[in-house]
Amino acid sequence: MKAEIMGIGTELLMGELNDTNAGWIATRLPPLGITLQWVTLIGDDLAQLTHAFRQGMERSDIIFTTGGLGPTQDDLTREAVAAAFGETPAVQDAQVTQLQEYFRARGQDMPSHNIKQAWLIPSAQFIPNRNGTAPGWWAERNAKIIISMPGPPVEMQSIFRDYVEPRLRELAPPEVTLTRNVKTMGLGEAAVDEIMSEYFGHENPYLGIYSKADGIHLRVIARAPDQAAARKMIAPVEQAVQDRLGEYIWGYDDETPEQAVAAALQSRDKTLAVMEFCTGGFLTNAITEANDAARHFRGGIVAFGPESLAASGVPPKLLENHGAVSQEAANAMSAAALTQLNTHYAIGVTGAPGPAELDGRPMGLAYIAIARATPAGPQVIRELEIRVPPRRITIKRRISNQALIELRKLVEAGE
């Protein structure tokens, strides 16, 4: 089954909102055996929407729409679906009653404009929305389906999980699509491509390569009659990736660097602290995104200048001799964080965040140090110099990800 997604709303075209719905829906379709082939953004224009729906029904089996189901004059999804089907919407009394009860429960009277949220065409059914006033539509005619859902992600995701996905599962062909995402760091995209070259270019299973902020990802995609068969197709490709790139692999599927570190530390009852200079708290924030981070994270020190580094335990003489952007400074930062917060491991990161050079160091140059506690005191067990593209957010993200991935490897190795 072929599908497409249409994000509806002029605000999407103006850049006022980002369409996160399409990406979320796209991740839910492969296990259902549905192939996504188009994603479109369309403004609040009845003629354009109607044309898009008619064109979509010529090339796809299912159209998913998000947005345009509100009560205002520029919410035109219902009108466009009706026009594409050549049908006239009519008010459904039962839905009007539900809307009135929704507002009454909140101590309000239903505005008259909300009546359009009770419209329905003969070829459509309502999809309940327990988080808002806009029910979705499941419109079906001549083996073509348009599934219209509200734009707010909380409402859309709830509708999809509770009502759309179960129904699609019944309609899906006897084929599933499974993916396995293997995440690496330490080699460039070209190097990984060369190492795995013989596995690229095949349709099923398919191996794709992607450059991300947390390294190079390899995604294996297999289509088969059932999950067991798909897993069997993925297995030899995944094994080849592990055999050839094992030392660079740090995670799988949806795993993030902070989740990988959390799992490694928590399974060993180890703790972590950080001191960061150029990342402005990005590293600390990432660590606290992991589940139950309080189990392993003891705190972060965010310094942004030699004075604050010195106040946080980095020797002023060291800073005078080597500068704040140096491996020596990173080492001292990791040791100071470990001592001050009494942890098993500590990370120190420093670099030139831009927009200009710092202490003669170019923007994007950074140093990472990882220390561990020993009976004799802090011991630096990993030093790393990296160069990151000179963009502020890229610097913060890349340095933080690299530091966490390096720590995870050390913890997993028992160092």
Image: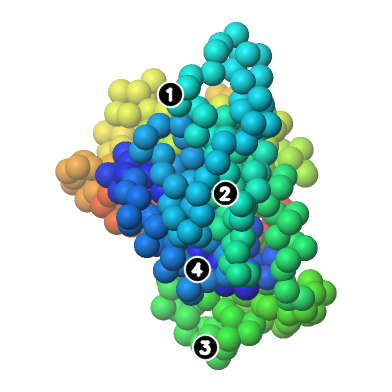
CA–CA distance between discs 2 and 1?
A: 67 Å
State the image coordinates of residue 119 (x, y, percent, origin top left): 55, 39
CA–CA distance between discs 2 and 3?
A: 46 Å
CA–CA distance between discs 1 and 3?
A: 53 Å
State the image coordinates of residue 93 (x, y, percent, origin top left): 64, 31
Where on the picture, by quarter, is residue 351? Answer: top left
Work out whether mark 4 precedes mark 2 in sequence or the reverse, and give the earlier one.
4
How many C-alpha atoms fall within 10 Å of the one at disc 2: few (<14), some, or many (≥20)? many
SS state under label 2: loop
- For label 3, the residue is 201
The answer to whether 153 appears left or right of 314 in the picture is right
- For label 4, the residue is 57
Number of numbered labels in the structure image = 4
Work out whether mark 2 precedes mark 1 in sequence or the reverse, and give the earlier one.
2
Residue shown at the point (57%, 49%) measured from the top left:
121
- For label 1, the residue is 312
- For label 2, the residue is 121
Residue sticking out furthest to the right? 228
| Tag 2 and tag 3, C-beta contact below 8 Å | no
How many C-alpha atoms fall within 10 Å of the one at disc 1: few (<14), some, or many (≥20)? some
SS state under label 1: loop
Q: Is residue 263 positioned above or below 71 on the image? A: below
SS state under label 4: helix
State the image coordinates of residue 90 (x, y, percent, origin top left): 55, 41
CA–CA distance between discs 4 and 2?
A: 17 Å
SS state under label 3: loop
